[in-house]
Amino acid sequence: MTDIIYTLDGGTYFNITNKCPCDCAFCIRSKGEAVGEAKRLWFDKEPSFEDIKAAIDAYDFSGVDNAVFCGYGEPTNALDNLIKTAEYVKSVKPSIKLRINTNGLSDLINGRPTAKEICRVIDIISVSLNETDSEKYDKITRNIYPGKAFDAMLKFTRDCVKEGNEVRMTVVDVISKEDIEKSKKICESLGAKFIVRSFDRGR
């Protein structure tokens, strides 16, 4: 059975879709069936909100202060379920702070500006910056929106910052030190916090 909720290094994660417009060269899901304490993160069929709600109802959230939307897919590829799930979690466990780990391509995926509705229910937005320009970004993410994705990701990040939420941008330490520094400057120009993720640690 596929895990909808799983733990990794003590953190609680929601796996709500396997769909993603990217096929990143460094993606952790290329390493195996699951991460952390999950047994399997690949769905045979995409979960409905009822499936996700049932998983939440069955999960023991005792001692859980933070939870992250980040599974084997891009959470905004299931935007309706993302919003409904976040609202439901807040209704049954209002003290939990919610974060989304996203590629920032939600506006392209959903065909409309989405930062406002996401920021309404998600406390922390973590956007994968990945690279320093459109050409390099397309090469490493292998996304389905070549030439458009990089700028869309920057705009989404900027829009989230405008909403007043805590916004982070991340890169994985597979890129050069020079590009990590360039990425940091891009991030700071948008008003977001910069984080370098470890490929070896898988987060």
Image: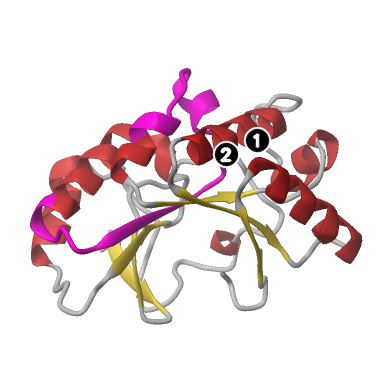
Seen as rendered, the residue at the extreme top is 111
Res 66 → quadrant: bottom left
User: What residue appears at the point 15 percent right and 69 percent down from the top-left corner?
Assistant: 59
| Circle 1 residue | 154
Q: Is residue 15 above or below residue 76?
A: below
Residue 178 vertical placement versus 106 (above, below): below
The image shows residue 25 at horizontal and vertical percentages of: 71, 54
- Which residue lies at the image location 72% right of the left edge and 43% below the top edge? 189
For badge 1, the amino acid type reads Leu
Disc 2 to disc 1, C-alpha distance? 5 Å
Quick check: 176 left or right of 146?
Answer: right
Residue 157's mark? 2
Please name the amino acid that badge 2 sits on.
Thr
Looking at the rendered structure, which numbered label has been put on residue 47?
none
Membership of 93 in magenta stretch: yes
- The answer to whether residue 88 is left or right of residue 24 is left
Q: Is residue 120 above or below residue 146?
A: below
| Image location (x, y in percent) of residue 51 | 16, 49
x, y percentage for residue 85? 22, 46
Stretch in magenta: 91-117
Question: Are there few (<14), some (14-19), or many (20+) residues within 10 Å of tag 1?
Answer: some
The quadrant in which the N terminus is found is bottom left
Neighbour tally class for label 2: few under 14, some 14-19, many 20 plus, Cα within 10 Å = many
Instruction: Kindly give the residue lying farthest to the right in the view shown.
Output: 178
